[in-house]
Image: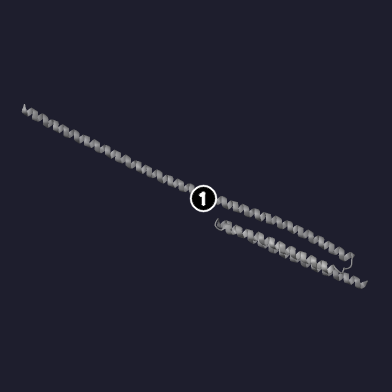
Amino acid sequence: MLAWATSGRSHSSHLHRALSKEDLTLKLDTAAERRKRHENEKVQKAHEVVARVKDTNTRVKTHSKVEATEKLSRLHDKLDHAAEAKSKKESRKKQELESHATVVKQRKEAATQDYPPSPGHEEISRKLNEAEERRKALEHDKINKVTNHLQVYEQRSRTSSANGKHELEEKLNAAERRRKEQEKQLQEKLAAAEEHAKIVRTRKSAKNSLS
């Protein structure tokens, strides 16, 4: 009887130890799974954070690039508009100048052909020359203002784009060339008018001498 009891207690203790070992193994496996799942979650969150940062950086870069492109486009539009307006204005001024020169030439020819030089002829010529000089000075000032305006645009565009700067320099050079060409044309017309006036006076003097 005693041997049976002792044998029963030994079997129960062995079973308890076996159950405890299985329970411990289960707990360890469960803990390992939780740890692994936790690590996976942390890795997944890290990937999500990196993806969000990359997406934010991409959107910021894209926005900055689009904004810079739009700003440069607006600057080019302003430059083109200013150049077009200046070209139209110069063309209109040139036509007015040519028309005025034609009228003055016709009036001088008519005056020298129909009437002898009056005492005030030299005074009138002087006033006409002074008016022409004032007109040229005014035109020169206007061209300088436009050139200065374009130079301001050049300074603003230096931080925008090297291409914009190059384009602006070309526009400024073109404006300067047009200004010099216009001055040259004005000087040639003035010289031609003076030469014509000398010829008319010479012919008139010769005619008076023959009379």
The spot of residue 112 in percent (x, y) is: 87, 66
Name the spot of residue 82 as percent of width and height, x first.
65, 55
Above or below for 12 versus 129: above
User: The disc labelled 1 sits on which kind of residue?
Assistant: Ser
Q: Secondary structure at mark 1?
A: helix
Disc 1 crowd rating (10 Å Cα; few below 14, some 14-19, many 20+) is few
The structure residue drawn at horizontal position 59% and vertical position 59%, both measured from the top left corner, is: 154
Q: In the displayed structure, does residue 200 sit left or right of residue 180?
A: right
Rendering coords of residue 32 (x, y %):
27, 40
Residue at 78% from the left image edge and 66% from the top image edge = 129
Which quarter of the figure has residue 93? bottom right
Task: Decide which of 155, 185 is in the foreground and name it.
Answer: 155
Q: Is residue 189 at all visible to an observer of this figure?
A: no
Q: Which residue is located at x 66 percent, y 56 percent?
A: 83
Circle 1 residue: 64
At 64% from the left and 61% from the top, the residue drawn is 148
Residue 61 left/right relative to 115 = left
The quadrant in which the C terminus is found is bottom right
Q: How many marks?
A: 1
The quadrant holding residue 85 is: bottom right
Q: Taking 137 as reference, is 20 above or below it?
A: above
The quadrant holding residue 206 is bottom right
Q: List the single residue furthest toward the bottom.
A: 209
Is residue 157 toward the left or the right of residue 121 in the image?
left
Q: Position of residue 113 (x, y in %)?
A: 88, 65
Q: Which residue sits furthest left?
A: 2
Single out the residue that lies furthest toward the top: 1
